Image (tube, grey):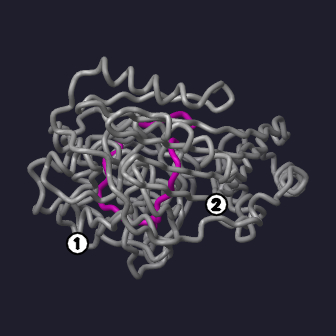
């Protein structure tokens, strides 16, 4: 696919008469097996190439996108992007497209991932269904293996290629009264242990049967990496990029240099971290830099792309999103890492006198008050009552309404179980451990 993408991209770039031009080609090949009610109901193979052209004419920016299958003449895309630019208002703060810079090599492509067959996937699912059925548990989930190929070219000399592979196995186990959840994400499918993933989900569902009803209130919680990653993904979108600071909608506005989390909490973004989805450059072709966002609880910085870096007189950190999204949401961190602590999960639980063990959060909404990072959502995937440092029994799900600024200041301990958690809505992954948070605010209960 590499040669094909470069060939198409160079035709478009060479045909452009704009002041500056950028061509982004994003190719994917994906094989997905989906199952529900303990039955495989979908095997899908998809091959796709999306092309986005950004043309600059006198500080006017035109962006057009098309699927390769719908493209008859590549050179026409350059002409169209220029026409769009000529009809667009000037972006006064725009300087220019990036120039080439050295990019580190990363190993993100593994042939073992693309060699996994639908039959291999079906075999694993069949074994897990046989394990779950006698327990009165049905299984749903997805087993996906995919490869991506990214090419970025621009008229200033950038010419970059990045290949990567991705394997994910996610299992949701359901009984009449309980649910279990487990997932594993790997670049190299040879490291994937799908049967163990399924066993964890089934075991949590089995132990969660007939949950007890508890009242809402403030509870100390031990949260698995899945739950914390869901919260972090919302925080990243709402306030960890420079555009959110420029537009005064970030919860970090007026808080840089101040305590916004517990001293045990350090958060950074690192495009080369092996437990994320290593990606050496952004969608402008700028090398990614490690950015410390919160250090020992102190707000330090956010991430930048070329536009926001120029506007705020900062250095570009290589966090541009696609051209279509850049003007709307700005730069976003997609390789967040929480510095792990020294505590095992058992030690986190042992530190709780009365509280809850939470697998994950669900239906999270962070739009209630972004400046104060007030979120609402529900527990999901297995919730258990902790008493005197031991997990005692399952409880029904609860709804929370809480400021994450408050919650993060109440993080008392961070686990040593740093885990790769894939993002649901975009390409990328975070490296997140379990955490102990004191006095987390639950405001409602459910019937299940």
| Quarter occupied by residue 189 | bottom right
Q: Earlier in the sequence, mark 1 or mark 2?
A: 2
Q: How many marks?
A: 2
Residue at image mark 1? 296
Residue in the picture at 49% in, 40% down: 14
Q: Residue drawn 83% across and 54% down?
A: 121
**Residue situated in front as seen by the camera: 442 or 119:** 119
Circle 1/circle 2 CB separation < 8 Å = no
In the depicted structure, whether residue 258 falls above or below residue 343: above
Q: Position of residue 304 (x, y in %)?
A: 27, 52
Magenta: main secondary structure: strand
The correct choice, above or below, for 114 with respect to 133 in the image is: below
The image shows residue 152, relative to residue 328, as above or below, that is: below
Q: Which mark is residue 184?
A: 2
Circle 1: element type = loop
Residue 201 location (% of width, % of height) = 68, 56
In the image, is 359 to the left or to the right of 437? right
Q: Is residue 181 above or below residue 57?
A: below
What span is in magenta? 425-448
């Amino acid at each position: 696919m590499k040669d094909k993408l470069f060939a198409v991209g160079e035709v478009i770039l060479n045909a452009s008469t704009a002041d500056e031009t950028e061509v982004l080609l994003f190719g994917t090949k994906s094989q997905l097996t989906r199952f529900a009610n303990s039955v495989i109901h979908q095997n899908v193979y998809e091959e796709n190439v999306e092309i986005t052209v950004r043309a600059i004419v006198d500080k006017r920016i035109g962006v057009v996108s098309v699927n390769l299958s719908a493209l008859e003449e590549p050179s026409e895309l350059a002409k169209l992007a220029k026409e769009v630019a000529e009809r667009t208002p000037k972006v006064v703060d725009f300087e220019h497209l990036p120039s080439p810079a050295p990019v580190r090599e990363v190993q993100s492509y593994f042939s073992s991932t693309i060699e996994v067959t639908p039959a291999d996937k079906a075999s694993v699912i069949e074994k897990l269904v046989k394990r779950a059925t006698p327990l009165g548990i049905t299984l749903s989930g997805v087993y996906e293996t995919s490869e991506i190929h990214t090419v970025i070219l621009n008229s200033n000399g950038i010419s970059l290629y990045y290949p990567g592979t991705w394997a994910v196995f996610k299992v949701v186990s359901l009984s009449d009264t309980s649910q279990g959840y487990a997932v594993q994400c790997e670049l190299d499918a040879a490291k994937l242990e799908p049967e163990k993933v399924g066993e964890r989900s089934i075991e949590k569902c089995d132990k969660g049967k007939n949950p007890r009803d508890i009242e809402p209130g403030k509870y100390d919680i031990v949260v698995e990496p899945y739950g914390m990653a869901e919260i972090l993904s919302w925080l990243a979108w709402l306030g960890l990029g420079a555009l959110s600071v420029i537009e005064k909608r970030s919860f970090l506005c007026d808080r840089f240099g101040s305590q916004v989390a517990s001293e045990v909490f350090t958060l950074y973004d690192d495009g080369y971290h092996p437990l994320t989805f290593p990606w050496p450059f952004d969608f402008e072709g700028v090398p990614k830099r490690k950015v410390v966002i919160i250090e020992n609880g102190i707000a330090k910085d956010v991430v930048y792309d070329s536009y926001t870096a120029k506007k705020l007189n900062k250095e570009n950190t290589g966090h541009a999103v696609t051209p279509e999204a850049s003007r709307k949401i700005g730069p976003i961190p997609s390789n967040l890492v929480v510095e792990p602590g020294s505590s095992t999960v058992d030690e986190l639980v042992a530190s709780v006198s009365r509280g809850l063990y939470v697998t994950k959060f669900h239906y999270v909404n962070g739009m209630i008050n972004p400046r104060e990072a007030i979120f609402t959502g529900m527990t999901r995937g297995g919730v258990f009552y902790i008493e005197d440092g031991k997990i005692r029994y399952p409880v029904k799900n609860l709804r929370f309404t809480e400021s994450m600024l408050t919650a993060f200041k109440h993080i008392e301990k961070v686990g040593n179980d740093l885990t790769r958690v894939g993002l649901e809505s975009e390409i990328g992954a975070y490296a997140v451990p379990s955490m102990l948070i004191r006095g987390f605010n639950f405001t409602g209960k459910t019937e299940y």
